[in-house]
Image (cartoon, coloured by chain):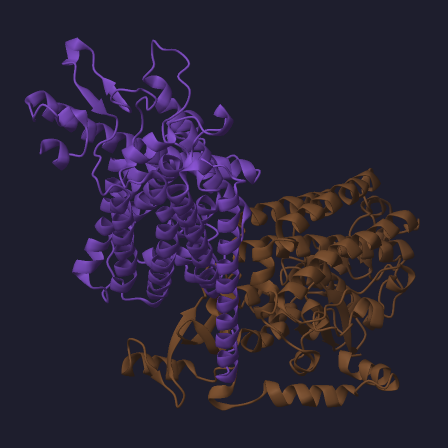
Amino acid sequence: MTATEDLTNTTSTDGAPALEDLVFEGSERVFRRGDDSAVLRMSEAEVAQLAIDAPNVALETNTDERTIMNMGPSHPSTHGVLRLVLELEGEVVKRSKPVVGYLHTGMEKTAEDLTYLQGATNVTRMDYASPLFSELAFSLAVEKLLEIEIPARATWIRMMMCELNRMSSHLLFMATNGMDLGAVSMMIYGWREREEVLRFFEMVTGLRMNHNYIRPGGVAADLPDGWTDEVQRLLEMIPPRLEEYDILMTGQPIWRERLQGVGVLNSAEALALGATGPVLRSTGFAWDLRRDDPYLAYDEVDFDVVVGTYGDCFDRYAIRLNEIRESMRIVQQCLDQMPKGDYRVQDKKVTPPPRARIDESMEALIHHFKIFTEGFKVPEGEVYAAVESPRGELGVYIVSDGGPKPYRMHVRGPSFINLQTLPHLMYDGLLADGVAVISSVDPIMGEVDR
Amino acid sequence: MTSLLAGLDPLFLNGVTLEVFIIVLVKVVISFGVLLVSVMLMVWFERKLVSDMQNRIGPNRAGPWGILQTLADGIKLFFKEDLQPDSSDPFVFKLAPYLSLVPAFLTFAIIPIGGDFTKAENPGTITFPDWLGGETTFLQLADPPVGVLLFLAMSSIAVYGVMLAGWASGSKYPLLGSVRASAQMVSYEAALGLSLATIFLQSRSLSTHDIVLDQAGAGWLGIIPHWNVIVTGFVPFVVFLIAATAELNRPPFDLVEAEQELVGGFHTEYSSIRFAMFFLAEFMNTVTLSAIMVTLFFGGPSGPILWDTIGWVWPILWFLLKLFAFLFTFVWFRATLPRFRYDQLMDLGWKVLIPISLGWFLFLAGRNVVDDRWPNTNGSLFSKEVIILLVITIAILALGAMLLYSAIRNAANKRELEEVTF
């Protein structure tokens, strides 16, 4: 189920404008052409030709003298290898064009050569700041095809780990957003808190990132002894640190000046561009898959969907800051309500047998051998499963031909789709605003390029 | 004649002999060396302090506590390949670093770094013991009558270094950096100069020696020092501190080399020792400007002399302590504040700092007029005349503020009509 289908029903009943009208209204503005457009539609060849024709500056348009400037792929604030071709008028950004593909490693294609069990190791490398979400979306999709029901404990472990991962991802955003705006100390503070969360991940999964922890059928291992103390320690440690962020950034006059009213988007435009996550919520459009299309056990926990009002960079910052707090609420509930039981489904065709069983049972040995060489077979069909990742709707679409490997896998990466909003957010702002905008969209290039 | 040419340094009163020449030479070498060493320590201090504020360790490899890190970096940069872009203007590209570095050195010459200013005879001097010639001299390299104007002139020349470096690189990021630099430094120089004008009004001199001397006496109640920061009522100091931070291109005003936007700003294309020169100049400016602030607002080396036997040590110690406080403040700024945006920076400079310093200058000038016309008020704050002055000043300031506000509104409306949105 996509965002669009579901919302058509809900909003039109409230008497609010129907979603189609809203999207149409947004697309009117978003898809304007010519010099007035926010998107620079110029091929690499044309840019190269321009460099020969007018090597120094002027690009003549019918309005003014404009310069083409290249930002990235190696630039301190393009979050890795994003490249932006900017058309500048003085220091004002006019049209711009994000260029992606510098981190392309063909992961979606690679997935066709990996079994469903190996698939999680592949997808976890996409969004490296929130790897558990990719694993979760992939596993949910495979489980839908297999039509298996996973145990309650596995569901709750997944939910808790994902919310902790949302915290670590948003803490990383706090760090990079501060750094991009020149509050360099914030970089270290954000990383310091993120590191605490990652330390817990290392305790549970053995790795700080790229965990391969959430797998089709459950999770890789049960929570280790003493996990409650660790989680409790995190929940006690982080809130005062967030208060410090409030002092250092939220209430800081320079910080507010830099972010408020910068990179403004409205709901119609955001919907027309397919933006999700904090970018969409900042426009005041409350859309969160955890609430609107509950997966795992999100319908059993109590949390708020944080929305903004103005759709500017400050709202996106504030939403993420408060989502950390909401995630902590969910983690607290997971801690209190964690059910007992098995951490993975007891289906011999999907779950590898425990090590001890292999020595005793011939059947177990065969299952183990089959799962790790050929992989388990998944019924024919196609499926789409989406989760609310820290960046928006992260969906995995899998087509199975009945074999042990996907016939085709496609990932709807929220970073990639949110990247479309960049030219519209940056239009008519200063170069410094452009940096704030890139930072507030928070793209992870591994997920953009896949 | 000699004394007029060479300032008022008693050293020159008896003509220029070999001894005098040697003393001046030694002073040149010492101030050069002290400045270089202090810059080295400042870089280390900044890195160490910032890392402390950020939960890091900072440099700790070269020498004890990493104190030789700057030296190691300098040596490394010296032996690096010197790269020059094809599209650059070769002559200007090579000239620019010197235009930055030389003024940074020169400014330090006018700073009095020691000498007891409370002495009745020859204040602010030290006298060498007889076996060293028995000469009496200022503890500053030069005391030209233009004094502080030299500092303003040097800081204006330093703008050229930054501006030309960006322009001569023949690349877009440095160009943007240098455009920002010239606008920023030129506009903040206005605020800087206006806040200094209050000092001149108060001390009635441009010479740094005289300004320090003026602050040496005891102030109100005999406890509060007679420093310009208090005498001129804090406002010029605050304006000066903000403008100086902007003039130094230090955070939160480091737009010129905003790493996250312009990569390296004006020095993006510079490498090796030429980059080191810019780096050196920047930190040297931080040290000299802090020293200028100490001299002009905080009484320079003045402070209590606790032991008479080593009396000449105390003023130097006080000076260094005050200097240290400012260096700490600059590092603190850097660790705490996010960066301004270009237009916000300009707004702050032109619409806030310059009007405030102008208004305050007007007030202090009026205050002086009151003192001149009605000497019987004796500088009392609550006499009738001073209150009349206050009322008139506030009225004029309010009128000025209203005019300024309406002008800004008017301009904003016009910009809106022209559909300029930022």
Q: Is residue A112 left or right of residue B18?
A: right
Residue sitting at x 68%, y 71%: A310
Question: In this rendering, is residue A290 above or below B331?
Answer: below
- Across and down, in percent, residue A281 comes to 73, 70
Which residue is found at the position 41% from the left and 23% from the top? B303
Q: How many marks?
A: 0
Q: Nearer the viewer, residue A445 or B417?
A: B417
Q: Nearer the viewer, residue A110 or A372?
A: A110
Which chain is brown in the rendering? A
Relative height, residue A46 to residue A440 (above, below): below
Q: Where is residue A36 shown, x and y percent of the image? A: 50, 87
Foreground residue, A73 or A116? A73
**Figure quadrant of residue B104:** top left
User: For the N terminus of chain A, which image quadrant?
Assistant: bottom right
Q: How far across and how far down the image is residue A270, in percent?
A: 67, 78
The residue at the point 45 percent across, 73 percent down is A92
Q: Quadrant of the C terminus of chain A?
A: bottom right
Q: Is residue A342 left or right of residue A210?
A: right
Q: Is residue B10 left or right of residue A385?
A: left
Q: In x, y percent, where is residue A303?
A: 85, 60
Left or right: residue B173 versus residue A393 is: left
Colour in which chain B is drawn: purple
Depicted B269 relative to depicted A410: above or below = above
Can you see residue A164? yes
